[in-house]
Image (spheres, grey):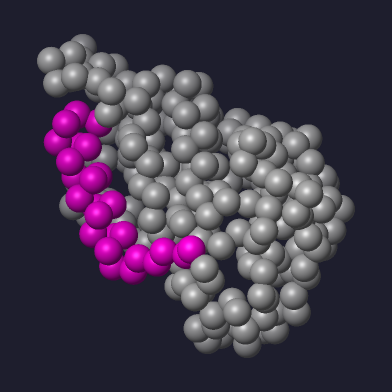
Amino acid sequence: MQLQYENSFDVKEKIARAQAAILPIGAVEAHGPHLPLGTDNLLAERLAATLAERTGSFVLPTLPYGQVWSLRNFPGSINVSNEALIALLSDIGESLFRQGFRIFVMLNGHLGNATALKEAARKLAEQVPELKVYYFFYPGVKEITAQVRESSSSHASYFHACEIETSYMLYMAGEHVDMSRAICDIPDIGVEADCTPTPWETFTSTAVLGDATLATSEKGRAILETSLDVMTHIVNDAKKRHQPTP
């Protein structure tokens, strides 16, 4: 169910039944020569649509801009501040609660948004404690990712336009992937990059952090279906706990 296509006369009762709203959040940023700038948006909104179907929840219009400070100098990247994201997400959460939602899922497709989402969730926990807020970024995939990947990760936390993220796209939005242009670029990211603000152009000219040529739809399916199972279980459990009193 997509909230933007509902009408004001009918939506109130549907909100009371659904209880949960899912907000896909992504970014517009460089993803190498083989993936589009809106990769994170595509992944977030298609995962959100699937999660909504499996949980009987509403999907909100995609929030398409994120905090991409590290990639802001690459062609096509659009950056917004953490402060702007926190304020916007907090306002959206309060509005959803006022409309009758009791579960707010921020389904994130971009790692750079993680700090803002966590802070917004903490802010909402204080302002509207009756609203359960989740921030999802591919939960539950550590083990399956280690099983299916063929190349080493270039960083302990980052994965970007590489074997893994390209596999995600091949599974969820394959029509937007050009594997004929996929490359292998495994930069040397020193420990200092984790200790000080470091623009990515200091260690990569492509924005690819790994071997995208090894990506397959099958790998993407294995990882993303695992994460969808985890998210579905969490949301459905939350909905059981937040059933309205008859």
Residue at coordinates 25% horizontally, 16% vertically from top-left? 14
Indicate left or right for 6 with 109 as reference.
left
Q: Depth check: 100 or 130 in front?
A: 100
Quarter of the image where the C terminus is located: top left
Residue at coordinates 66% horizontally, 37% vertically from top-left? 174
Residue at coordinates 38% horizontally, 35% vertically from top-left? 22
Relative to residue 46, is residue 192 depicted above or below? below
Relative to residue 16, is residue 35 depicted above or below? below
Q: Decide whether the magenta segment is chiefly helix, strand or loop.
A: helix
Tell whether position 203 is magenta. no
Tell whether position 97 is magenta. yes
> Magenta residues, as a range?
76-101
Q: Can residue 115 be seen?
A: no
Residue at coordinates 38% horizontally, 25% vertically from top-left? 57
Image x and y of residue 125, in percent:
27, 51
Q: Can residue 80 be seen?
A: yes
Relative to residue 40, is residue 151 depicted above or below? below
Indicate left or right for 237 with 180 as reference.
left
Quarter of the image where the N terminus is located: top left
